[in-house]
Each structure stands twice: as structure tokens, then as C-alpha cells.
Image (spheres, helix red, strand yellow):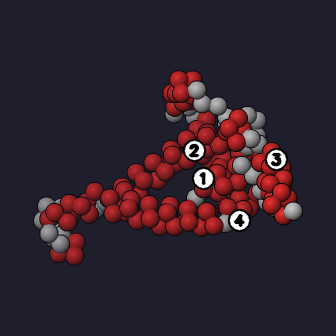
Amino acid sequence: SMQIAFFAVAKLPPSERGNSYFATKTCDLLFQGDGKNLPAFMIGRQLSIVSCMFFVARVTSVSLDENDENIFGVPNVVQALFNTGLLGALLLTIVGSIAWQLVASAFPRAILANPLTYVLLRICLLFESTGICSGAWVLAEIHKRLAGFQRDEVYIGTAEERSKKFIASKSLHIT
């Protein structure tokens, strides 16, 4: 859900990102420098999600002895599914991810103002800083050069430029 809120405010001018203490701290950290913390967060986020999925799958998997009855008296095929931990991972995906993404898309500034968002951003940036996924940066740079990608500002302008164009086009339609 954090990534939804981050992308929702990424193209807003700083004055429109919220003025609470943690919203300001989160945005300052996320968008500082040349903007590498947002993609770094996405890498760290992926590492944390994979870790959570392995943990939940391990915790929710069932290991029965050969003589034990199946849980709820289900057939062996269904019990084999229970044994994988897949149901726990599916539940985590629905409750722990999709539901919160809907909340974040509706209330991105409220997500930014939550102190837990700042803490989780720091944790994700710490995961990325370990270098486990440093190869992703190399692949991204190669793809950027091959495809000729440029920063978003080249294509759509900065938030301030877009805001001025919107105000200008709005005033043209009013008169």
C-alpha cells in the first residue's frame, strides 16, 4: 500500500504532499537527491514481501505424521494443499496487501502521515542497501540506455510546470 501512496504523491508539488510531521519526513527521505530512494524502496519492499511470504508459508504449513488423520477429514489432495502453506500466503496477499492498496489509493496523504510508513520506508531502504539486489540496478541502467528512457520530467514536465499549465488552461476555459 505504501508504494501506491508514494506513486500517488510522486508527481505532486511538495506543497500538496501533506504538511504533517511524518508526511514531510517520509517525502523528504523518499524524494531526496536524484530520486533513487523511490526505486530503492521498491527493491527493499520486494525483499520484505518475499521474506514475509516465506515466513507465513512456513508458519501456516501443516506437517502431519503418517498415522494422523487429515485436518477436517478432507481428501489427501486437499490435505497436500494445506501442507504447502499456500493458503496462508494467499490470505496474506488478500488481507495484507490488496485491501491496504485500496485504502492507500483513496487516502495517500493519510498513509504518508502515519509514523509506521516512515519506519517501514527506512526498513525497506535498509534491505536494499544490503546489496542483495544490486544487479537490478545494473540491468535497469542497461535497459534505460538501450530503450533511450529519460526521466519523467522530460516527457511530462515537473509538478510545478504541470500545475502552471493546468491553471493556464483552466483560465482559458473560464473566459
Front label number (3 vs 2): 3
Q: Residues within 10 Å of mark 2 (few under 14, many from 20)?
A: some
Direction from residue 80 to residue 96 in the image, left or right: right
Mark 2, secondary structure of its residue: helix
Count of marks, rendered view: 4
Crowding near pointer 1: few (<14 within 10 Å), some, many (20+)? Answer: some
Mark earlier in primary sequence (3, 2) = 2
Labelled pair 2, 1 in contact (Cβ < 8 Å)? yes
Q: Which mark is residue 144?
A: none
The mark found on residue 42 in the picture is 2
- The amino acid marked with disc number 4 is Ala
Q: Amino acid at mark 2?
A: Met
| In-front residue for pair 102/80 | 102
Judge left or right: residue 132 versus residue 168: left
The mark that comes first in sequence, 4 or 3, is 4
Image marks 2 and 4: residues in contact by CB distance under 8 Å: no
Provide residue 55's location: percent of width, then percent of height: 42, 54
- CB of mark 3 within 8 Å of CB of mark 1? no
Give the foreground label among 4 and 3.
3
Image position, residue 98 (x, y; %): 49, 63
Task: Tell me what residue is drawn at x 22 percent, y 76 percent.
Answer: 72
How far apart, in angstroms, are the residues tagged by discs 3 and 2?
25 Å
Residue at numbered disc 1? 3
Q: Nearer the viewer, residue 74 or 43?
A: 43
Q: Quadrant of the C terminus?
A: bottom right
State the SS at label 4: helix
Residue tagged 4: 110
Q: Is residue 69 left or right of residue 119?
A: left
